[in-house]
Amino acid sequence: MNEIPETSAPVAVYRGESREIDPGACFHWLRRGWLMFMVNPGILIGCSTLLLVMLMAIGIVPIFGQIAAHLLLPLFGAGMIRICQRIDQGEQPEIPDLFAGFRHNAGQLVMVGLYFAMGIFGIAFIAFLLVSTGLLSGTIIARIGSMSFELSAGFIVGLIVILLSMPVIMATWYAPAMVLLHEMKPQDAMRASFLAGARNFVPMLIFATFLIVALFFAMLPAFLGLVLFVPVVSGAVYASYRDIFTGN
């Protein structure tokens, strides 16, 4: 009598479903980021210092260095996510964890970096054209109701760059975590990241505002504050990923 071969159950494909969270959650993310840092400050400071030194060394090379840095950001971002994951799970992180993205799904992460670089440099090129062709020059009078405001062309260009950059940043914010931890393809990961950002636009906007302000102060003492900024923000980003995508 022939035996019926066993068939394994199909593995569910992770699609990056996100949930809507309360705007005040961003303060919880920042708190968790700080607590993760306090669990193992030595490793986090060491990894952050190594990361900053490597990015600055790469960025010294004109044009190509900037492009390479943008391509590698998702790989290093994935490494920081791995470090935060190990701390969150009660494990002991190590310096080699910073290079987890180079060892796992490196090609997919580079593709995320490529899309990111294309978006950012494309937006910068548009801004350059607006200024160099004279389409935006001098001052512009903006009217809101009965009030009028005189705005410089530089301010308008900066505003355009910020607005156009938001979709790119939203699409790549959680993409490294999606690729590294859930084996998602770059396009699917970026789509899931963008939808999560769009669904939680208000808390993400508050979160981004705090990060921009913190980054400003972190760069004041000869960029030394970045050694603290990078690990705390990495922990906060990991906490927001857990909150939005896994619900814990």
Image (cartoon, helix red, strand yellow):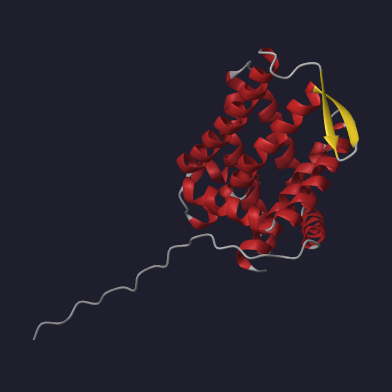
Q: Where does residue 46 sit, x and y in percent of width and height?
A: 74, 41
In the depicted structure, whether residue 25 falls above or below residue 223: below
Q: How many marks?
A: 0
In what quadrant of the picture does the N terminus appear? bottom left
- Give residue 53's quadrant in the image: top right
- Give residue 20's quadrant in the image: bottom right
In what quadrant of the picture does the C terminus appear? bottom right
Residue 224 in sight: no
Task: Decide if residue 186 is on the left or right side of residue 56.
Answer: left
In the depicted structure, whether residue 40 falls above or below residue 136: below
Residue toward you, 24 or 68? 24
In the depicted structure, whether residue 7 falls above or below residue 191: below
Task: Decide if residue 182 is on the left or right side of residue 174.
Answer: left
Seen from this angle, which residue lies furthest front? Answer: 146
Residue toward you, 93 or 216? 216
- Give residue 90's quadrant in the image: bottom right
Residue 11 in sight: yes
Q: What residue is rendered at 71% in x and 65% in y?
A: 21
